[in-house]
Amino acid sequence: MSELFLILFFPLVGFLINGLWGSRLQEKSCALIGCAFPLLSLFLLTYKTAVSDFYGVSILFTWVSFENLTIDFALKLDHLSLLMSFIVLGIGSLIHIYSTKYMHGDQSFARYFSYLNLFLFFMLLLVLANNLLVMFIGWEGVGLASYLLIGFWYKENENASSGAKAFIVNRIGDIGFLLGIFILAFHFQTINFDEINRAASTANASATMINLSALFLFIGACGKSAQLPLHVWLPDAMTGPTPVSALIHAATMVTAGIYMIVRLHPLYMQATAVLPLIAVIGTLTALLGALVATVQSDIKRVLAYSTVSQLGYMFAALGVGAFYPAMLHLFTHAFFKATLFLSAGAIIHALHGEQDIYKMGGLAKKMPWNMVAFLLGSLCLAGVPLTSGFISKEAILMHTYSHSHSYSQTLTILLLITAALTAFYISKTFFLVFLPSKNGSEKPLHAIAFAMSLPVIALAILSIVVGLFHIPAFMENYLNLAKSITIKEEAHILIPALSLSLSAFAIAIAYLITVKQIKIVPKILEQKFYFDHLYEKVLLSTLRAFCKRVLATIFEVKIIEAAIWSMRDLVLFSSRRVTLLTNGQIQWYVLLILMALSLLMVWWFYV
Amino acid sequence: MNQVELLFYGGLLIVIIGLLGVISRKNLLSILMFQELSLNGVNLVLVAGSILHHNYHGAILSFITFIVTAAEMAIAILILLLLIKKRKTLDVTFYSELKG
Amino acid sequence: MFKFTLGLSLFLPLILLLLPSQKERVVAWVNMGIQLLLLALFFTMLTNSELCEFSFTLSESLGLHYHLLIDEFNKYLILLTALIFPLVTYASIDFIKTEKKLFHLMLALSYLLIVQTFLAQNLLFFYAFWECSIVPMFFIIGIWGGGNRLLATYKFVLFTALGSILMLAAILFLVVANYKISGVFTFELQPLLRLQETLPLSAQRWAFLAFAFAFMIKIPVPPFHTWLPYAHVEAPAPGSMLLAAILLKMGAYGFIKFVLFLFPAVVEEWRLPLMAIFVLGALYGSALAFVQNDIKKIVAYSSIGHMGILMLGLVTPSESAISGAMLSMLGHGLTSAALFYSIGLLYERLHTRDLFHFGELATTMPRFSLLFFLITLSAMAVPPTLGFASEFFIFLGAISYSLKMVITSNHYLFIAVSGAAMLTILLGTLYSLRLVKYLLWGKKSEASLLRAGVRDLNLGECSVFTVLLLFIFVLGIYPQFIIESFKLAIKGLSIS
């Protein structure tokens, strides 16, 4: 079992080597070290699981042990965490290889790879955790790595602010996560996943406690997985390098919230008051993300809002109790979104840093392979039949339709609209970028290295393959998550028909808009429903102004210090008055003596 | 009120007058003269006391007081002369080094 | 060995006094050498887990025993002191430019007095050393401080003395009450602990208030905290390190050792107001840290925030909260020493404490940036640092206790207070990231462009950070070994 710790710690070693000595090494060596360790972990994991029965829990040491709570530093490998580890290490390694050429020539090449390895370490820790605390260490750690990577090119103030925004919004969620941990620790005397899941299903678990802890853990998941209203950090996170966006903000970190809920799905199945909330927020996020994505002009922002939207889909699935479809969509989304991001990165790289889709055009002839990759990714995202994206999206829609609550029909309708919008914006982007247009620049393109194109193509192929070869059915049995919904008969026909017709309609409109070059941008969409405004003005500016004007100036200076200064003033005032008694006049002193003497005598005689 | 009581209260009165004078006069010499008056009053009280208690203690003490007062006055006048030479004034309000 | 160590700490100032003042480097290295020796001695004593007690009776009838004891509460604080002092001495080699021998003498005196304060078991001696330990600080701030140092040092001394006078009154009251009740006149702590049963509650409340007032000034708890920003800003960097890392902990230690043990009934009765005061203070300190433009003030106010949460942990009757609070004393000591050391380094190179005069230090001082960022992680309570572990335990205890209160007696205010306490996590992130953003990231500000290239850390300076970071991360990853030793101490506090 100790090999599990090796698999976990290899990326950490890579982080240390590149971090401490990377600046003295050549670019090639840094790249080698940076890619070698994740690949090593991947191979070790594959080998071990293929050869032996590698599953189980391994405890390293006891982190803390109180009277009624013991927390160990323990890792657990089961089917769910194995799947996630493969996603993390597999896509992670491909992105590492991609980055060797994308970041070529950058001043801080070594630092980039060290941060990337650090991220992998924390993500693996999160995924392989056996209890909520180890997961939380990974949770915060990936937030930290994300902060460092978003603000990687730190000379621009904007990048540092975006990184800070991500970390701060994440932290707001983390407060919720911690509260959830504490409530569970109090009620169940344990924060171990298996023990919580077992205890939650028993009869004497308090419904209030389960609902409360589920709610707070969900708030944490909202922060990490960019759900309303804590989604504001994800689009701004695009200031980081594109491979980072692909890895962290599409495939792995943002899926942590969903992973956590799936891990605790027995608990969530009991939290009947919270599940509707999850479903509603997921759906609203999906809808909002798709709406805002339609008006974005930066290709990375389109993909960012698309990620927000797709994550919303996953949460909607979780909210109706469809845990397996959520995991399936997580799996397929990781592949096709990474494909999209990496091919967008190739486009940006080729066009020397241009990110505005309205300034691109006609790339179909210049980058054919890239176009194929982007096309495959877009087809998956739009949910075209025979792609993996189609299977996972339909699974979610069928489950929401079949869910027995009154609101589920509304949710299904909203999700269908979102699917149409998704098809619209991604096809619009595809048409704008690849079809010939007069906006395209005539500059010669920067060549794309093989190291960059290989991962893109690999991911594109994988995103299709998963759909074609009945992998979903195999995964369903493999993961063996609890099922609570039986799909209605008509859903099998109705849902695909509706979604396909809506998507086809949307793609047609997108084509028309691109060709006719119509550009309508409603104000509310442009302002992203004023959520960023909320973050900037309400959270930051108001808080800062309150702290500055009320607390620092009024309270601190005028009230508290005034109290102290007034004590000093009182003492000085009274002492000045008292010194008037010592005026140096001898007669005055004599008089005082006489008065005192007479008072004494009166007191002596009469008292 | 018989003679002894008159002597006693008269002496007390003179003491008080003298003290009041010490407090309220501006000229140092006047202060000294009033202090002298006060001491004389003390002598009268002592004699009255001697008569009242039918022994000689008060009388003897009053003799001693006389001598001490005389010596003290001699020195006091001398100090006054030195003060006039230094400060050119006998106004007691100017002698306020003890101030503060 | 205990007597030898105590004797050595007593002779250290005397030895330094005898050394010639011209040979400044000799004075510095002798000071540091003996302090490292003391660290080794304390460490061996405490790992051997022998009983370290020393008692000398000055007057039996007056109950004056010079009684020193290393118990579970001051054990780690003594180690913290012994660890921080050599680092402070090392820092003062570079940062103090004038009257070096006198400064080292002040440090040695400070060492002696602080150790005695932690070890004292007799109320009068505790009080005496408590008062005396202010004196070296008075000189350190007053002689080697910044522009406004006289105001700062007077404010510091007078404010602390005000609280201490009230504490003296309470001590005398307790001793006399004990004499009236039991006929024994003693200043020893153990006998006085029996007063909690015999003394009427109203009298206990007044004594509690007096003690608590003294400690709340020292810790500091708003609204009695105003001396801290002044003292920190004007003090020289080694002085700030000392003040933040150790002197503040004396207040918290006094609170545990005396207030929690002497007046448990009063604490039980007033638990909610106390928790509220500490939480509001923590929020206030963290909120103010967010809007300061002087980097020393940011760290000073953040200390107030952290100590507020520490105190919250102390008054919550939960094993994990109190363990977390005691762990937090160590964590905050290490973190704030490192933070003030870094501010001192920056001031020495750039001669400014204005937040906006820095910028892009990640490029010009990469080693410093890395180490500083790691320290900030602990201040922000990011796992796996000690800052995270201690705050996790404190909040775990507070929330568990509050939930218990909600279930058993329908008191919802406890959970409101504990929930509000968790907002300090957000505020901590805000001010720490702001500090990091203006120091490490961004473009070099125009003001700093005028200066020549600053030099990065040398080996010695790196090692100061490394030592502190080592403890922060190791204890954050494996806190159990310290938590184990707190268990026995906490039993004595009789938590339900």
Image (tube, helix red, strand yellow):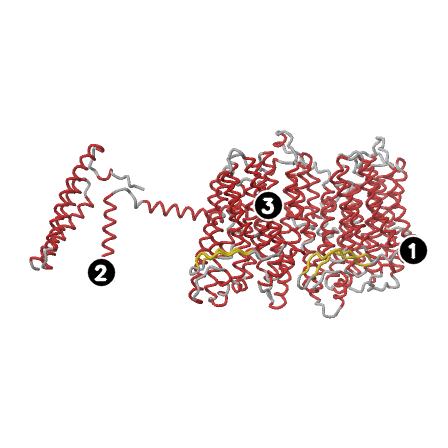
- Element class at badge 2: helix
- The answer for which chain carries disc 3 is C
* Residue C431 appears in the rendering: yes
Viewer-proximal residue among A569 and B96? B96
Mark whose residue sits in front, 2 or 3? 3
Q: Is residue A520 above or below residue A604?
A: above
- The residue wearing badge 1 is A470
- Element class at badge 3: helix
CB within 8 Å, label 2 to label 3 = no
Other residues around mark 1 within 10 Å, as few (<14) / some (14–19) / many (≥20): few
Which residue type does callout 1 highlight? His
* Residue A326 appears in the rendering: no
* Quarter of the rendering occupied by the N terminus of chain A: bottom right
- The answer for which chain carries disc 2 is A
Viewer-proximal residue among A246 and A303? A246
Choose top left, top right, bottom left or bottom right for residue C444. top right
Mark whose residue sits in front, 3 or 1? 3
Which residue type does callout 3 highlight? Leu
- Cα distance in 3D space between marks 3 and 1: 70 Å
The count of marks equals 3
- The residue wearing badge 3 is C37
Horizontally, residue A1 falls left or right of residue A132, namely: right
Q: Is residue C103 above or below residue A209?
A: above
Other residues around mark 3 within 10 Å, as few (<14) / some (14–19) / many (≥20): some
Which residue type does callout 2 highlight? Phe
The mark nearer the N terminus, 1 or 2, is: 1
Viewer-proximal residue among C50 and C166? C50
- The residue wearing badge 2 is A605
Rendered location of residue C167, percent (x, y) = 46, 55
- The answer for which chain carries disc 1 is A
Mark whose residue sits in front, 1 or 2? 2
Rendered location of residue A346, percent (x, y) = 84, 38
